Amino acid sequence: MKKIKTSKLFLKISTCATVFYISFFCELRRNPAFSFTGGGSFREKSRVSSRVNIKNFCSGTYLNFSISFFGVQSNYPW
């Protein structure tokens, strides 16, 4: 039976989490317009698409991925 080295896996996961936390929370402090709640920002926030547009984008992306990755044949023009 192969011995699994968990220390390397743990190090990889913890490194990814550290990079996420640093980039996310430092960006919040550096750029007040980078906010999900909208509290106290002095710059105009970028316009966010509606939920319908985001849902359509995500479903289209998933469909394109599944067609290209799994080799599914379809009648869609892309």
Image: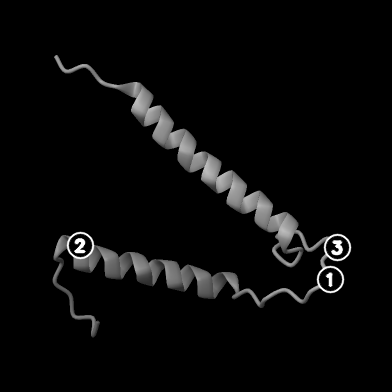
Of the two numbered discs 2 and 1 on the same chain, state the one appearing first in sequence.
Answer: 1
Q: Which residue is mark 1?
A: 42
In space, the residues marked 2 and 3 are separated at their CA atoms by 44 Å
Q: Depth-wise, is mark 2 or mark 1 nearer the camera?
A: 1
Q: Report which residue position mark 3 lands on.
A: 40
First-in-chain label (2 vs 3): 3
Determine whether the residue tagged by mark 1 lies in a helix, strand or loop. Answer: loop
Q: Quadrant of residue 52?
A: bottom right
Q: Is residue 60 left or right of residue 72?
A: right
In the rendered structure, which amino acid carries the disc numbered 2?
Answer: Phe
Q: In the rendered structure, which amino acid carries the disc numbered 1? A: Phe
Query: Quick check: marks 1 and 3 in contact, CB under 8 Å?
Result: yes
**x then y, percent, for residue 72:** 15, 66
- Going 35% across and 28% down the picture, which residue do you hit? 8
Residue found 79% across the figure and 74% down from its top: 43
Lateral position of residue 63 relative to residue 67, left or right? right
Residue 74 point in image, percent of width and height: 17, 75
For badge 3, the amino acid type reads Gly
Above or below, 69 relative to 21: below
